[in-house]
Amino acid sequence: MERVDLLLTGIGTLVSPPGNRPRCGQAMKEVREIKDAAIAIRQGKIVFFGPVHEVEEMLAGVEIAKTVDVCGRLVTPGFVDPHTHLVHGGSREHELALKRSGVPYLDILAQGGGILHTVKSTRAASEQELYDKARRSLNEMLLNGVTTVEAKSGYGLTLKDEMKQLRVARRLDEAHPVDIVSTFMGAHAVPPEFKGRSEEFVDHIVSDMLPAVAEEGLAEFCDVFCEAGVFSVEQSRRILLAAQRLGMASKIHADEIVPLGGAGLAGEVRAISAEHLLAATDEGLAALAERGVVPVLLPGTSFNLGLTTHARARDMIDKYQLPVALSTDYNPGSCPTESIQLIMMLASLNLKMTPEEILTACTINAANALGRGEDIGSIEVGKRADLAIFDAPNFAYLPYHFGINHTFGVMKNGQAVVWNRKLVAGKEEES
Ligand SMILES: N=CN[C@@H](CCC(=O)O)C(=O)O
Ligand SMILES: [Zn+2]
């Protein structure tokens, strides 16, 4: 090699899970930590990393176009947020008092509020309004150290409005430094015009929506809210298998509130991931383990809904050897936060995950929940140089010192997109 584009040096601690594969059970705790480290980057990819003296030896005689000293800071892989409802219209703070008075989430939905309220605001919003709002949230995520985000549709619930959401996600992926992975979630709720006729709505999804979404190549995954009073296991199976035939892999909002069997279905259809899982049974967790499904846990949601029960992360890791991933579930109802660093604190508090497990869950396991373990989610030679730089002495400091943003900088494909705690001008929206 004759030249590297960037040498990131002065790294106090470099910490990353090793490899590309999902990390299960005990392996979630085994992270690689290197003191006084450096990373060499060429054409957006990592070409060497290790203790600074070793990297310098490797680079003897190689032209280094630019050197940046991060002055002893912590460097991790850029975080991957594998479950968000990024693109939507409006907000739902008017439901806060109702929620706090104890009215259950599904009752608010059954009364036409909740998700259905956001459906109204999303239908009423123009594509540009949705774009501008989602871009602001994406900037917040980037400032938190996140470099890849999954984004679901599901607040349009007509073909036209679902496509509107998905096109916004595609435009953001093209224009914003954060990579967006799109999921079609037309089965997020039964819209008012199909009230009492959920089977007909499922027919409409299968016959009209899925083919149109596939035709325009707007989504890589298909997700269903498989929940009592929303979509049954049979309906979810029908939608997910139809989507698979069109090339969209499956994700499931599974066993969030009622143990309906969503986790079992995730195993059966070989979903890439199953999300929430607060009410998942042992049988359901065993099905995930048997079929290599990544459980995506959303502790911000149970926290914000004021629940005293939480997903059984310890059982998932210790007993079922599952590769747990974490996510914000950013959405306007059950979890209005873009902060993955807050989620880390809640994973420690309520899921009893260790800092090492949390790091693994927010990086390589989250990348595998999106089928991107070969490309992102760990600091490895050949992978994209998506990196987060923190004003922190070690990774445990992030879930420990909570309620503030520790990010100093973010590199996306080897380019600084956040520096000195600010978006780098022009990088928040490249065109
Ligand atoms: N549970 C279903 N969907 C979202 C919430 C959507 C909303 O309340 O707007 C979730 O994952 O938490
Ligand atoms: Zn969700």
Image (cartoon, rainbow, N blue to C red):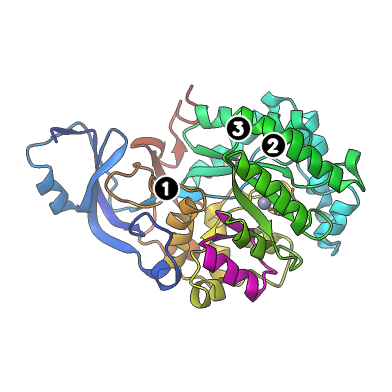
Task: Please give the label number shown on residue 326.
Answer: none
Residue position marked by numbered label 3 in the rendering: 218
Residue lying farthest to the bottom in this orientation: 319
Question: What span is colored magenta in the figure?
Answer: 272-297
Q: Is mark 2 on a helix, strand or loop?
A: helix
Instruction: Assess whether residue 116 is covered by the magenta stretch.
Output: no
Which one is nearer the viewer's eye here, 307 or 293?
Answer: 293
Residue position marked by numbered label 2 in the rendering: 210
Q: What residue type is labelled 3?
A: Leu
Q: Which amino acid does label 2 sit on?
A: Leu
> Where residue 258 sits in the image (x, y, percent)?
76, 66
Residue position marked by numbered label 1 in the rendering: 78
Q: Please identify the quarter of the rendering in which residue 91 is found.
A: top right
Discs 2/3, front? 2
Discs 3/1, front? 3
Q: Is mark 1 on a helix, strand or loop?
A: loop
> Where residue 64 sits in the image (x, y, percent)?
17, 34
Instruction: Assess whether residue 277 is covered by the magenta stretch.
Output: yes
